[in-house]
Amino acid sequence: KKKGSILEEVAVAPKKSPIMAEESEEPKLDRFGLPIPTEDDYFPSLPEGTELVPVPLGYQTKMKDVKTAMEKHISLNFDIFDEEGVEKLAVESDRAPMKLRLVHKSPPVICVENFFTPEECAEYIGLSEPSSDEGVLEVQSKTFA
């Protein structure tokens, strides 16, 4: 077999087509020229040694567990709740009493059921879904100027 020239041995890389450019190592940018956020940007990995303690399946919330879970993080006044996490004296209204539910022990995650009345929920939902006859929603903030 005949040996080729040195130019044949050193092949020039073909120019990348637009399709190949998408597969490149360069980060994709949004319309502002910033990197597109990834899952790690929204949910970063927890630091090494982070304690992860879930609540057992079927667990019924006890206030002593809520207080223990929260003591190293923030101080809250839990005086309005009984030992099962139910609001002792519901505000004089037609709403059901608030109830605390410990979702995760460490890091602590607490759910407050009945925090808003059904009317308040409807009002907040209405704010996020303006009807077409209300016109344009204007944000009064220097951040969005």
Image (tube, rainbow, N blue to C red):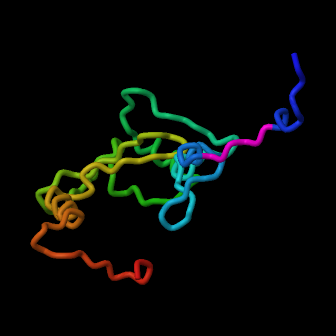
Looking at the image, the residue that sits furthest to the front is: 2
Nearest the eye: 29 or 59: 29
Nearest the eye: 82 or 6: 6
Looking at the rendering, the stretch of residues picked out in magenta corresponds to 11-16
* Residue 48 position in % (x across, y down): 70, 42
Residue at point 27% right, 56% down?
Answer: 115
Relative to 88, say whether 1 is above or below. Answer: above
Residue 14 lies within the magenta run: yes
* Residue 84 position in % (x across, y down): 33, 41
Residue at point 38% right, 81% down?
Answer: 141
Asked whether residue 68 is in view, the answer is no
Asked whether residue 111 is in view, the answer is yes
Relative to 54, say whether 47 is above or below. Answer: below
Whether residue 57 sits left or right of residue 50 in the image: it is left
Q: Which quarter shows the N terminus?
A: top right
Q: Which quarter shows the C terminus?
A: bottom left
Q: How many marks?
A: 0
Residue at point 23% right, 58% down?
Answer: 116
Whether residue 87 sits left or right of residue 48 in the image: it is left
* Residue 97 position in % (x across, y down): 22, 52
* Residue 108 position in % (x across, y down): 50, 46
Residue at point 84% right, 33% down?
Answer: 9
Q: Quadrant of residue 56?
A: top left
